[in-house]
Every structure is written in structure tokens, then in C-alpha cells.
Image (cartoon, rainbow, N blue to C red):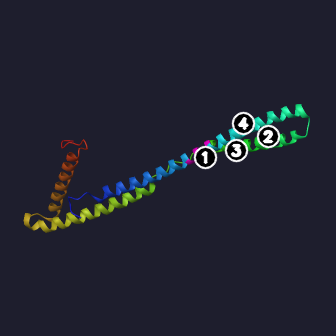
Amino acid sequence: MALHEPIATHRAGARQLKSYSADLSGWVGDIIRRYTTAAILVVIGALLVLVAVGFGVAFLFHVLELHYGLNVAFGSVGGFFIIVGLIVLVWGIALLKRSLPPVPRPVRQFQELKRAAALDLILRRDQMQSVARRHSGTLGMTSAGALALGLIVLYGLGRIRRYRAGNGTTLSS
């Protein structure tokens, strides 16, 4: 890994952000499925109650008209639809009243990002030490002085890169 390449923390951060985004989209998908199912069940329940009301009206009409016989059939069918309709309505309303699952926390992603940042820091330190050792003799500096100079140069290059990337960071701040 050369010093001018993007650090591994950026790649790991992007990976963890994508992972958390996938967790969030799964969470939203579950909520959408639950509400869609609940809405369908409420509509079906309402339709079945309407059918039951229709049979109930027909039942009352026939009871008054014929006084038993065919009326038992209408009563049983109407009763069946009203019971099924009410069960489905209660089921749909119970689904709508359930509390939402908690928003997923990016704990796993943060742990991965911390590991990647630590590894990147170790690799950068080792690179800077090897560069300092190689060039300390040619510059007439001690290894500590060369390491300090290397860190200053690395910091300056990072500031220039951020400035050119348009992060809103200026060289004076």
C-alpha cells in the first residue's frame, strides 16, 4: 500500500455504511410487508362484514316473509360471514397496533470500522518508520527527526487532498 493511496479506513467505512444501509432497508421492508398485509386483511374483513350485512338484511327480510325454512340457510351463511369478517378485522387491527421493531444499530459496522482504522494506523506507522529509516542517513537526521518530518509531510499532503476534494476545508483552518 503506497502512501498516496486512499487509506483502508475509507474503504472500510464505505463497506460498513453499505452494510448498515442493507440492515435499514431490511427493517423498512419488514415494516412495509406488515402494513401491506394488515391493510389487505382489513379490506378483506370489511368486505366480508359488508357481505354479512347483506345476508343479514336478506335473512331478516325472509324471516318476516316466510317464517322459517329457507331462512335458516340465509341465517347460517350470514352468520358465517359476519364471524369470519370480524375475526379478520380484529386480526388486521391487531397487526396495525403492534409496536414497530427497533431501528437496527450499527454496532457491528462500527466495530469493523474501528478494526480497519487500527490496522490502517499500524500499517501507516510501519511505512513511515521504514521511510524514515531509509532516508535518515541521506538527510543527516535521526530516525525520530525523520519520522517527525514524515508525519508533517503526510499531514500536509492530507490537508491538500481534502482541500482539492472540496470538503470545504481550507488550508488556513
Q: Which residue is mark 4?
A: 50
Q: Which residue is mark 3?
A: 88
Q: Are marks 1 and 2 in contact (CB under 8 Å)?
A: no
Q: Secondary structure at mark 3?
A: helix
Q: Residues within 10 Å of mark 3 (few under 14, many from 20)?
A: many
Give, as a three-letter code, the residue at label 1.
Answer: Thr
Residue 159 image position (x, y, % from top left): 20, 49
- N-terminal of the two: label 3 or label 4? 4
- N-terminal of the two: label 1 or label 4? 1
Tell me if I can see residue 65 in this picture. yes
Query: How far apart are the alpha carbons under marks 1 and 2?
Result: 25 Å
Q: Which mark is residue 37?
A: 1
Q: Nearer the viewer, residue 107 or 45?
A: 45
Q: Secondary structure at mark 2?
A: helix
Which secondary structure class fits the magenta region best?
A: helix
Give, as a three-letter code, the residue at label 4.
Answer: Leu
**Residue segment shown in magenta:** 33-39
